[in-house]
Amino acid sequence: MLADDLRADGFSGLGSPVGKTPNFDAIIERGCIFRKAYTMGSMIGAVCMPSRTMLLTGRSLFRAKNEASTEDPATHTLPRAMREAGYATLHAGKFGNSPKKVTEEFDTSVDPGHSEGVANAVIDFIRTRPADKPMFIYMAGPEPHDPQFAPEEFYAQYKPEDIPLPAAFAPYHPFDNGWMTGRDEMTLPFPRTPENIRGKLARYYASIAYLDAQFGRVVQALKDAGEYDNTLFVIAADNGLSLGEHGLLGKQNVYEFGGMHVPLVFAGPGISKGETNALAYLMDLFPTVFGLTGTPLQSRVEGRDLSPVIRGEAKGVRDWLYTAYEKGQRAITDGRWKLIKFPHIDKTVLFDLQADPHEEHDLAQAPEHADRVRVMMSKLAELQRDLDDPVPLTAEVIQPAEWSPDRLTPEQIQYQKEETARCASNEAFEASRKK
């Protein structure tokens, strides 16, 4: 189950302060939660496409981008590997931002446009699947991506005035992170206000509640088919989302409550309830699914099998985790300490995530952390080389770091008004639902 733009704390069972997600919570309650799961990033404006490509190919960011766009039959994908292992495979949901080659390798692939239709397709597949084959279902609904669609009954559950502001809320980001006027950031006006952010959060939580209701229908179908106790559930998202933290709204950033940090839960036969801080990537899902089902993996992948962590046989599968966004942001973390480099403005920040989980106190200039910054910068450069990341850690031309909404052009202001209005409308959703 892959949600779209779901934060790592998006479900109430994962820490959402106001969300109502009983169906997801019932699975999460009996599963293994990875608190430090991430997508590696993106070298294009959208984060979703490379994220889904990495998940479905088991390849890292700077290698998956080429493999996913080729028709090379040697490129293994998760659906192809599952079919070769004897599974009947279904892809239901978004595939416009996944590589064509990958979606074509499912036995069946449909995109109804909203989670009610996605659930209908999954339920039909459960009921009519080949009786002699196990199932692999990739359920990828479009919620809660903006404009956070949901039927009105779900919006009625969330009043903006009752929703707390996120920690680290700010009217706008304090410096130019390289993506200050991207589409996501233009879905509310500058400066961000508590009222606007609460309104957006209300729509966001309503959309998640709608997604939860549809997921509940699928779970019931599995129970009706006698397959619930025999099903491995993997709950994740293509990327996270900022919703006012540091003045940001999108996924085009590497903060913890931003674009790369995602929910990840495994539940099912042989999996004990618990949680771990082991560092994980979405590309690890490919080999992990095979590890948990005991199916031999014939494919060459870069992702690492997390099943030893899930079974309590290992504390982790990597010591460092690397994330990147376009040419302007690079980050590295060992789970506690996190360093972010902004090459285009030659800025480095350091956070102690244990003491400062919302990244509000930059320690990079503190003398007592000089050695730590030096060591982490060296490790950052090492991982860059290992991953074939070509971006210099210091740009040839350093740009000004200062930024404010006063720099918006009239065209950008008009675009912002249009996006704000679009993200407050349900017209497209209702038309899709009726169709």
Image (cartoon, rainbow, N blue to C red):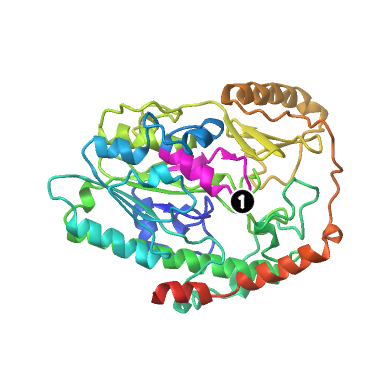
Res. 203 image quadrant? bottom right
Residue furthest front in the image: 71
Span shown in magenta: 33-56
Give percent across and percent down for residue 308.
36, 29
**Disc 1 residue type?**
Lys
Whether residue 36 appears in magenta in the rendering, the answer is yes
Mark 1: secondary structure: loop
Q: How many marks?
A: 1
Residue sitting at x 75%, y 45%: 177
Q: Which residue is mark 1?
A: 251
The answer to whether 146 is drawn above or below residue 106 in the figure is below
Front position in the image: 124 or 367: 124
- Number of other residues with Cα within 10 Å of mark 1, as a class: few under 14, some 14 to 19, many 20 or more: many
Q: Residue at x 85, y 57 (%)?
A: 407
* Quadrant in the picture for the C terminus: bottom left
Q: Is residue 188 left or right of residue 429?
A: right
Residue 180 coordinates in the image, percent (x, y): 74, 52
Q: Is residue 222 visible?
A: no
Q: Can you give x and y, in whole percent of width and height, for residue 288 in the image? A: 36, 34
Q: Does 8 sit left or right of 234 as displayed?
A: right
Q: Is residue 343 visible?
A: yes
Q: Position of residue 41 (x, y in %)?
A: 58, 40
Q: Which quadrant would residue 406 be assigned to in this image? A: bottom right
Q: Is residue 19 magenta?
A: no
Nearest to the observer: residue 293 or residue 181:
181
